[in-house]
Structure formats: C-alpha cells, structure tokens
Image (tube, rainbow, N blue to C red):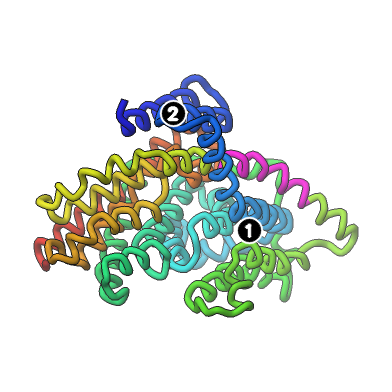
Amino acid sequence: MTPIIVLITSIVLLIVSVTRLKVHPIPALLISGLVLGLASGGSVHSVTQSLLNGFGDTLKWIGLIIFFGTLLGEILSATGGSDLIADSIIKLFGIKYLPYSMAAIGFIIGIPVFMDVAYLTLLPTLVVLSKKSNHSILTLGLSLSMSLTVAHALIPPTPGPLAVAAILGIEVGQIIPLNITIALIAIGCGLLGIRLISAKGASFVTSDTKPKAMNDLRGIRKVLPFAAILIPLLLMSIGTIFNADNGIVEFIKNPVWALMIGLVFVLPLLRKDNFTQKLNNHFQNAGAKSAIVILITGTGGAFGQVIKDTQIVESLISDAPNLAALGILVPFFLGLLFTTVTGSITVSLITTASIVAPMVTNGTMDPSYTTAAICAGSLGVIHVNSSFFWLFKEVHHLSTTKVLKSFSLLSLLVSLSAGLAVFILSLILG
C-alpha cells in the first residue's frame, strides 16, 4: 500500500476503535501509531522511539500547563472568582452575544499566546459563563477555540505566519492587512457554522464544585481573579512581542512560569484558616482532574509524531511542483492537506511554504495571496491526529464522535471559507 493509503487506513481504524468499539483513546492511539509506523516500513525500535519522542515533546511544555491551568480553575471555582469574572463578562457583552464575545477575545489573545495555553487559561471562565447564561459550554468553547486557531494560523507574530513570510521572502508588514481581512471573514463564517452545528452542551466541572457567594470577595480580592487570568496572558504576550535576548523576558514569556505567577494572585482568595491544607487539597484535586487529560494529550502527540516521521509527507511533496498551473489553489489545498495529515498547523505552514517558494520566487505566484492561501489552508481539518483535539475532548468530557461532528467539521468550514475569501479577493484585487 502507498503511504497515504496506510495513513488513511490507520486513522479510520483509530476512529472506529474509539467511537464504535469504545476502546480507550490511550491504547487506541499508541497501537494505531505502532501499526502505522510498521506498515510504513519502520522498525519496532524506530516506531517506538517516535511514539516516545512525540509523547515527551508534547508534554514537556503542555503537561505542567494543563496541571497549573486546572489548579487555577479549581481555586477560582472554589472561591467564587470564576463567578465574578463570568458576571463581569455578561454585564459587558450581554448574554445573547456571549459566543461572539468569546470569538473576539480568542482572536485578540490568540495572536500573542499559543491556543492550547490560552484555552486552558480561559476554561474556568467558560464553564461558569455556560452555567450562568444557559449557552452550551460547547458553543462557547467552539467560538473561543475557533478564533484562537484562526489567529494562530494567520496573524503574526505567531511563529507559523512569520516562518511563511521568511521562506517566501516577503515583509511581515505586507501580509498583515490581507491576513487580518481573511481571518475576520473566517471567524464570521465560523460563527455561522457554530449556529448550524447546533451543538448541545457538555459539562466539565462536576456538581460537587460549588462556588462560594461572590459577596465573600471584597476590596482588592475582587480584582485578584481578573489579575490571575489576565496577567499570565499579558506576560506571555509581552514576551512574544519583545523577543529580546533577555533573561527576564525569557522567564515571563514561558507559559509555565507565567501561569505560576497567575496562581500567586489567587492564593489570597483562600481562607487563612487551614490555608496549607486547603491549598494541598486543591493540588490533589487538580492532579486527579488533569491526569487523564495530560496522558491522552501526550498520546495524541505521539500518534502525530509517527505521522511526521514516516515517508507520508515526502510522498505528498513529490508531485506538488507539477500542480503550479492551478495557481492560488495549490498553496491552499497543500496547506489543508498537510494540516489534515500531520495534525500540526505550524508543520503545515512551513512545509507548504517550502514547496511553493520557487513558484513565488520566479513570479508565478503573488507572494501576498500565496501567503494568505497557505495560512487559510493550514486551518485544515483538526481531528484525531492532533493533540489539541484530544485536549478539547477531555476537558469537556465529550465523545470522540461529538468532537468530530463539531470541532473537526467547524475547522474544515473555517478553512474552506478562508480559502474562498483568498481566491475571490485575488480575482478582484490581484
């Protein structure tokens, strides 16, 4: 079998085993990765090493982030801090427009902050907003994650678009106006798509977590919940924008340390009596809640790493230069294909840009529209080979089928609408 057929077969078997046969995602992902690697010509040793590398590389930066994000949510929920933030957002935007406000917040935060970190940081607020507004947590979650993804794929200074600009030899300032336009169109279409999907709600925080009355938070304590959420995001943003070779900048832009700084602001929310015991209890609860999320996210990264280490991508690249006659459609569909195959937006952006760079250099393709098309395509289909897919599934306690029919379908819709926007604008203005 050709590499692409092996990949498709492995993904189908993975989906069937998790959805129909009810196999737990951890063994399903590991076994699917092993079978994929062996069927692609790898040895047991090399495939095992790919799985371990993927698991380790994924969790070396997101494992602690998941834990600290869960701990932050645990304390905010127990002290009424999440209620305070949620009520403030409701007063500011109104209940009716909460999905739109989540999309706006996600777009702004997603530019400087990685989508995984931003989503986990805002998750406690999402949960309480859902309870107070009767909006489905999945609707709010899809709005936030969709806009975070769009910002991650299209708007500098996120690494992917910067890498594309560098590879194609175009100034970053030249791509920003067009990419912002495409991003706003994509988010608008995504919001319409969420209404069409009409996803039902899902709960993350169990009913035994009862926030205390908000009137317990007085004076400076009413400001601390906002500081705990916003300051880590602000620190990471500053570290990304001012990417200086400075120890302080390196410290504050690291998501782990930024979140730990955020945790400092929620500690005064805890009662002084039995403070240490209460804090330790929150640590234990957060560890229990985040453990399975961490493991499944890691195995999702392991499966994705096997895909990247096989010859699948190389086999797709080999015929790509022969497609130049299709013009602007080539970078879009290549970006869509590579994200769908590899589960990584950044890998897709860099790979696609490297393939089409000669066509930009020789004048066959316009650099600005080519960049926009690559970024639009890289939104792709986010599914079972993406670690964020499993993260989203686990924090919301959803079935794999539910996430495929909502989150994965939405990512495809957003990508296609962004690609269509690029194509139309290139015809009108190009």
Residue type, numbered disc 1: Asp
Q: Is residue 31 above or below residue 404?
A: above
Name the outermost residue toward the top.
21
Residue 171 image-quadrant placement: bottom left
* Residue sitting nearer the eye, 22 or 101: 22
Disc 2 is placed on an element classified as helix
* Residue 55 image point, x, y percent: 57, 43
Quadrant into which the N terminus falls = top left
Can residue 97 be seen here? The reply is no
- How would you classify the magenta stretch by its main secondary structure? helix
What separation in Å lies between label 2 and label 1 (alpha carbons)?
A: 37 Å
Which mark is in front, 2 or 1? 2
Residue bounds of the magenta highlight: 282-297
* Residue 254 image point, x, y percent: 60, 66
Q: Which residue is drawn at 71% across and 48% down?
A: 286
Residue 231 falls within the magenta-colored stretch: no
Q: Residue at x 29, y 44 (%)?
A: 337
Binning the other alpha carbons within 10 Å of mark 1 as few (below 14), some (14 to 19) or many (20 upward) gives: many
